[in-house]
Amino acid sequence: MFSKEWFFYVFGRWVVISGIAGAIVQYLFTDTLGLKTIPAFLLNQFCLACVFWYVDRLIFKKHFSENLLSFFHFPRIKTTYGLKEQFDKVSQEYEDLKFKITQSPDKPQAWLNEFVDLEHTVEMMERLLRERNIDIDREYDRVAKENLKKGYYFPRAKEKKSTGRKPSRFLETLEKEILLCDGAMGTYLRSKGFGADVCLEALNLEKPGVVKGIHAEYIEAGARIIETNTFEANRFKLEKYGLAGKVRQINIMGARIAKEASAGRVFVAGSVGNLGRLISPYGEVSLVDAHDVFSEQIRSLAEGGADIILLETMTSFLEAKEVVLVCKEISDLPIICQLTFTDEGVTLYGDRLADCFYELEKLGADVVGLNCSLGPRMMIKLLKSLPPHFKGKISVQPNADLPRYKDGSSEYSIDPQYFMQCAQDIKDLGVNIIGGCCGTTPAHIREMAKVVVGPPKNREQ
């Protein structure tokens, strides 16, 4: 998980300095100054800390100006696998698939999981090759042409590329206007007295009036998109409350409450959050299981009447890709897909912002964007790093800064007036949807509504 450079630096520093440290304690502090062993040791540690601070400061200052990540690959899961390790994993998955097929050649369902795992490991190998600037697209084209000549397969008919998708009022509006989304649901509910032990999504069934009231507050503040109270309403996250069997009811009710509150005046986005568990190879959740969990929630939101599916706070490109494909499979509703990034412009798994945006748009996401984790100023910085020739539609929903914990609850420092100023700057970057995430309230949205109006700006200007 660490680069070899980082390992050699830390290990080498420890070996060299620990040897020197013993000599300094013995000969300088103990023998020369006559200090006892423990005071001598503590004084020695203080001196070493000062030396380490100065040396590290020089190193970090140098590599920050170049590219720190190219030298210190901090522990991102994506650096776990090199080419050789990934090749070994592809070989192992292939052998597993062959074994399963041999056992049940006429029962594809029995080896479907191994097939999907193999497909995924090949995809990861492709990403590793692309990171090394290897042009595999040219090779794909060459092999495809050769196989076509040999008659191994035929290209898909052009008409199959058309999905027959129904016209969307949301997408038509987005072509002409920048839209204001609502703010936080979860942190706003917590501020109203619902403690950490309360399943907020269950309020759709237990206290629908409270949820509807929050939707009404955001609509009154000027939001033109409201999100359902279903961010954590997937089977995995509801399990801890004993509500895994109520995924469908909670999501359908969440969509219906929002639709009732909207009364046709605003768009209702069915909120789908991350799984809360790691997908293979990062964790134990297979792509088949991830597909089933996402499918169950999204199907329910569509059944409840959501106008849009909003995929938010996705933690990796792999997770975002899977959930977008699920959406395309079971519904023709417009898709907004937002990931959460660090201040370095990568996900926790090392996926770069620009790469994610381009790939998700190719997969069929109508709008791509970022939300949560960061405040508005840092998101503005990340948006400026996006190539100006990216033509896709973008959504941005920052936090009201990072939370500060006081008396068991979270507090956010950015006031509505400052958020409005940031919204103007975000708008000037040519985004299509602006809203708020954790810590934002109807007061923030009310101020933002003053500037989030009119057509979107041209991003290339």
Image (cartoon, helix red, strand yellow):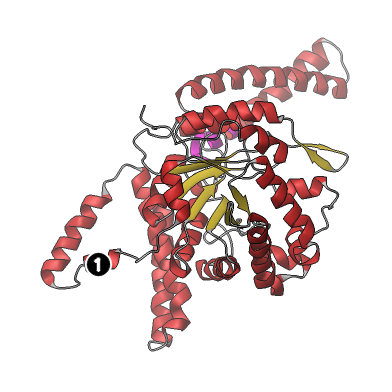
Percent x, y for residue 424? 55, 28
Q: Is residue 449 in view from this perspective?
A: yes
Q: Is residue 89 above or below residue 71?
A: below
Q: Residue furthest top?
A: 33
- Left or right of 166 on screen, residue 285: right
Picture quarter containing residue 46?
top right
Q: How many marks do you count on the picture? A: 1
Q: Main secondary structure of the magenta part?
A: helix
Query: If the image is split into quadrants, where does the C terminus sit?
Result: top left
* Residue 6 belongs to magenta span: yes
Percent x, y for residue 321? 46, 57
Neighbour tally class for label 1: few under 14, some 14-19, many 20 plus, Cα within 10 Å: few
Q: Nearer the viewer, residue 455 or 46?
A: 455
- Left or right of 243 on screen, residue 6: left
Picture quarter containing residue 27?
top right
SS for callout 1: helix
- Residue occupying the point 66% across, 61% down: 260
Q: Which residue is mark 1?
A: 159
Task: Give the magenta-colored segment's residue range.
Answer: 2-10
Q: Nearer the viewer, residue 128 or 327?
A: 327
- Residue occupying the point 82% across, 17% down: 30
Percent x, y for residue 192? 83, 47
- Left or right of 64 on screen, residue 354: left
Question: Hey, what amino acid is under mark 1?
Answer: Glu
* Residue 311 belongs to magenta span: no
Percent x, y for residue 147? 16, 67
Q: Is residue 352 in view from this perspective?
A: no
- Residue occupying the point 73% across, 17% down: 47
Q: Is residue 450 above or below residue 81?
A: above
